[in-house]
Amino acid sequence: MNQKTTTTLLSLLILLAPLRAFGITFPDKPPSEHYYVDEAGLISPETGEQIDKTASALLGEEQIPLFVVTISSLASQDAVTYTIEQYATALFDKWGIGSQDRNYGILLLISKGDRKARIELGAGWEHKFDNQAQQVMDQLIVPAFKRGDFAGGIAEGVRGLDAMARGLELPKAKAPWWLLPAMIIGLIGVVMLIINLFKTGRRGWAWALIAALGVFLFFIIRAMLSNAGSGGGFGGGSSGGGGATGSW
């Protein structure tokens, strides 16, 4: 390849580079009464109503806009060369979430086909809430997505982001439905075993086993109810407006 050909190719690459930015597509911003766009079909009517109610109250009371967007995949938006972080930033800026005077917008983006989600924060947050955003992602959103409960994960994520924006303690993830029945069955089993031991008069290691099972059951239940800890501190991030990324 001679120098002239190389120069020509470089010139073409420079000319075509801006087309990368113009080639991608974005969902249309929702009408003023709604705060979500569900192109991937993940949001149930009940969850949609909850998003609108929560986001409307947050905007009215704290002047903080919160939007949720689901897409089928980055490829469906002609954004195969973009990461989820880059696309979230581009969408955030395209929509102009927030304002110049109060740039505290929040975007929750879910790409179903890529199995990735991104919380993107406006520049006003200054990376000070990246730890809390990551906690919302890791504890409230991703676990539900791994179970295939996208509507539930989105609802929990919105609940957590609302608490974060208001400066409240982040909510705990809801305990699984089987936890209470399992706890009741376990306690009944321990009680029946103790009664049986009293009737038979057995002693020694059997009582030690009962005590060990009781202690084990207690700590397992307590750990599950606490859902692995409380809120985190402040920290730095890598994206322009701060935020958090998760995958499942």
Image (spheres, rainbow, N blue to C red):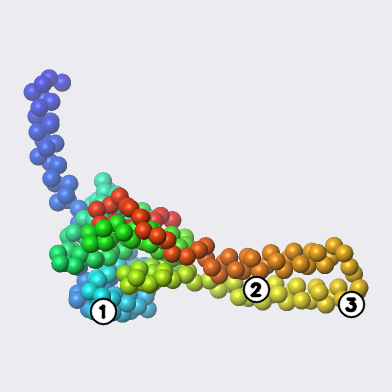
Q: Earlier in the sequence, mark 2 or mark 3?
A: 2
Q: Earlier in the sequence, mark 1 or mark 3?
A: 1
Q: Residue at x 16, y 49 (%)?
A: 21
> Looking at the figure, which quarter contains the C terminus?
bottom left
Q: Residue at x 14, y 36 (%)?
A: 13
Q: Which residue is mark 3?
A: 199
Q: Which residue is mark 1?
A: 61
> Is 100 in front, or is 244?
100
Answer few, some or many: residues within 10 Å of disc 1's Cα (few below 14, many 20 plus, some between 14 and 19): few
**How far separated are the C-alphas under marks 2 and 1?**
40 Å
Residue 81 rendering spot, x and y as whole percentages: 26, 46
Residue 36 rendering spot, x and y as whole percentages: 28, 70
Answer few, some or many: residues within 10 Å of disc 2's Cα (few below 14, many 20 plus, some between 14 and 19): some
Q: Which residue is mark 2?
A: 183
Q: Are marks 2 and 3 in contact (CB under 8 Å)?
A: no
**How far separated are the C-alphas under marks 2 and 3?**
25 Å
Q: Earlier in the sequence, mark 2 or mark 1?
A: 1
Where 48 sits versus 81, above or below?
below
Q: Are marks 1 and 3 in contact (CB under 8 Å)?
A: no
Q: Please tell me whether mark 2 sits on a helix, a strand or a loop.
A: helix
Answer few, some or many: residues within 10 Å of disc 3's Cα (few below 14, many 20 plus, some between 14 and 19): few
**Residue 70 visible, this orientation:** no
Residue 229 rendering spot, x and y as whole percentages: 50, 63
Q: Are marks 2 and 1 in contact (CB under 8 Å)?
A: no
> Is 219 in front, or is 114?
219
Q: Please tell me whether mark 3 sits on a helix, a strand or a loop.
A: helix
